[in-house]
Image (tube, grey):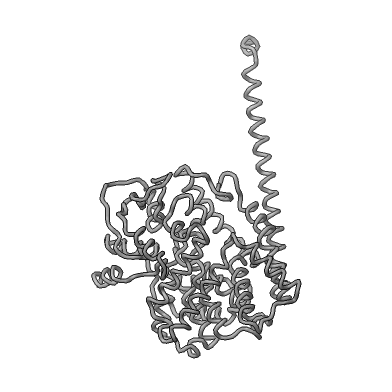
Amino acid sequence: MLETMISFCIRRRGAISYDSSDQTALYIRMLDVRVRSQVGFEPERRSSHPYLCIDFRTLHTRLSCGSLSSDSGTEKRVHRLLSFQRYLHSSRLLRGIPQQIPLPILDEDYSGQARCMLEKVGNWNFDIFLFDKLTNGNSLITLTIHLLNQYGLVDLFQLDMVKLWRFLVLVQEDYHNDNPYHNSVHAADVTQAMYCYLQEPMLAKSLTSYDILLGILAAATHDLDHPGVNQPFLIKSDHYLATLYRNTSVLENHHWKSAVGLLRETGLFSHLPAEDSMNMERELGSLILATDISRQNDYLSRFRTHLDQESLCLSNASHRHFALQMALKCADICNPCRPWELSKQWSEKVTEEFFQQGDIEKKHKLEVSPLCDREKNTISNIQIGFMTYVAEPLFGEWARFSNTRLSQTMLGHMGLNKASWSGLQQEQTIVSEEAELSTASEEAGGSRSKEIPQGSRES
């Protein structure tokens, strides 16, 4: 059985980042280099920081083992294109290390509780963390299958259930669960939020089944194979993905192309006319690329203009697609709008991922990215800034577009959460000031005792 699994891992193409243009050759050329398997670097690449060509297929494993230094000069050639995550899986198998795959069989009580939760999947206070536990780490697969069935999309588009199941299993597998934030649970959370938005009257009465299928698949794959670091890090470490996508929407392009790779590998849409399949892939990419936070102002400005001019016509296919882009953008960063118990957990997770990136940057003597220095930033100030400059403007405009109970609930939660973080920040400031005063007082007391003349002490 093990030999079969190893053979399967070696033969499979995997979720790859590719294009039908010359970028394909570029990607293969950049991957087909000798990779130092014990280090996780690409030694044949050259740049101003040649030792910083970090290969994230092994980075997280090496970090967790506390070893990024070379133990031997052994090198191995990468012959096939794997996602970062599945590269780790195949490497573990080849080294005889068992994979930590969730058991497919659950206790009946847990399965029953998961089914009960799915009956309320449209509630904004849906606890994705609990749902992930009840599904034994398979929240993304379980949720996506449920939503596709609930909308009748499996029958409508004549999707092969075996291909669909395999596609979703590979999607979930290609999320890095070592990432504190950008993992399959985040993808499931975004998918659940997207479903809530698709249920809003403005969209529900206008979207076609095709739009809904696109929206669900885009939400499920929007961060596929995310390495746990941001685009600036990939650029300054001269990562091959940054070169492949010319430093533009690097991660989002990779998520999209990885999703397309899985669609083609599993043949999920192979029964559709070629033109329809290509359109699906292209529009899926358009949705995923909209989640690039660096283009936030462009989308927000366009959205605001439509609302000001009342020119958004959802009977128009391109306008519906734009509304889907905005919905996915909202779903992607909706954590500040969740109830405090959920929002706080997400805030802690995303901040820890920032700090881990900062630790890597310090280790390799790179300039530490904004918000990534754990010694200079706190969860509170990061969250307050994110809500003020990113979340509030976006969700304020969304409430203009869809002025419903859900929109007001989200704004209400965000206001309360911001107040909670402000309160925590004030407490931390007070504690910090008291500690500084105490330290200063101790130092002053020590200085005075040293200044007492020796004769006075003897008397």
Percent from the top left, x then y, of residue 305?
A: 72, 69
Percent from the top left, x then y, of residue 277?
A: 46, 81
Q: Residue furthest front?
A: 22
Percent from the top left, x then y, of residue 18?
A: 41, 67
Closer to the camera, 34 or 339?
34
Q: How many marks?
A: 0
Residue 123, can we see it? no
Left or right: 292, with 409 as reference point = left
Percent from the top left, x then y, of residue 139?
A: 49, 73
Left or right: 407, with 156 as reference point = right
Asked which quadrant contains residue 431, the reply is: top right
Residue at 44 percent across and 86 percent down: it is: 272
Residue 275, can we see it? yes
Location of the N terminus by quadrant is bottom left
Residue at 53 percent across and 67 percent down: it is: 186
Asked which quadrant contains residue 268, the reply is: bottom left
Residue at 37 percent across and 76 percent down: it is: 265
Question: Eyeballing the image, is 346 above or below 308?
Answer: above
Closer to the camera, 263 or 6?
263
Closer to the camera, 176 or 23?
23
Question: Eyeballing the image, is 32 above or below 284?
Answer: above
Residue at 64 percent across and 56 percent down: it is: 383
Q: Residue furthest left?
A: 3
